Image (tube, rainbow, N blue to C red):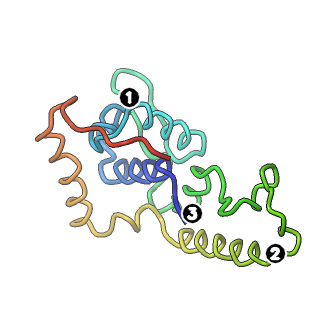
Amino acid sequence: MHLTVHTDYALRLLMLLAVRPDPLHTIDSVAESYGISRNHMSKVVLTLRRSGFIESVRGRNGGLRLARPADAIRLGHVVRSTEEGFDLVECFDAARNCCRITSACGLRHPLDEAIDAFLAVLDRYSLADLLGSPRQRRGIARLLWADAATHPAGERPERPETQ
């Protein structure tokens, strides 16, 4: 199973907002903290806003924040909202399925079961579970913002935008 970069960035954004809820964060500040593309982060923000995980506050002191407590955000729900589908093999997508053995094949059931099990595990964990103890949260915050201090804006190498 493979999750997209979009989902990876969505989970990272949610972790950042949970680790440091104040002050509010801008798309630019989040992208800089992780050293990723602002354009890609904008798409992630749009997905998470539409799904109700984050909200944006307009105005001079505006920015992004979690729309609900971290312990109320289940990882399985985030993954379902950020992944376009779980078509592990061609026959999962009826529109592009050209497999000759689909009607007799027994592969679909075990793969469906595997996807369900994967999502069931993620459903057991909340965003708060990813952050651990207050000490671990401080460690995450230190790692995120220490790098920003050593690499001024625009001087960080961009990571590739692959999906």
Q: Which of pointers 1 and 2 lies earlier in the amino acid sequence? A: 1
* Outermost left residue: 150
Image location of residue 101, percent across then percent down: 83, 69
Question: Which residue is at 53% across, 36% downward?
Answer: 46
Q: Which of pointers 3 and 2 lies earlier in the amino acid sequence? A: 3
Mark closer to the observer (3, 2)? 2
Element under disc 3: helix
Q: Quadrant of residue 89?
A: bottom right
Question: Which residue is at 66% across, 72% downward?
Answer: 116
- Quarter that holds the N terminus: bottom right
Element under disc 2: loop
Q: Residue 62, which numbered label?
A: 1
Q: Amino acid at mark 1?
A: Gly
* Outermost front residue: 100
Image location of residue 32, percent across then percent down: 28, 37
Mark closer to the observer (1, 3)? 3
Above-or-below relation of 60 to 84: above
Element under disc 1: loop
- Whether residue 99 sits left or right of residue 21 in the image: it is right
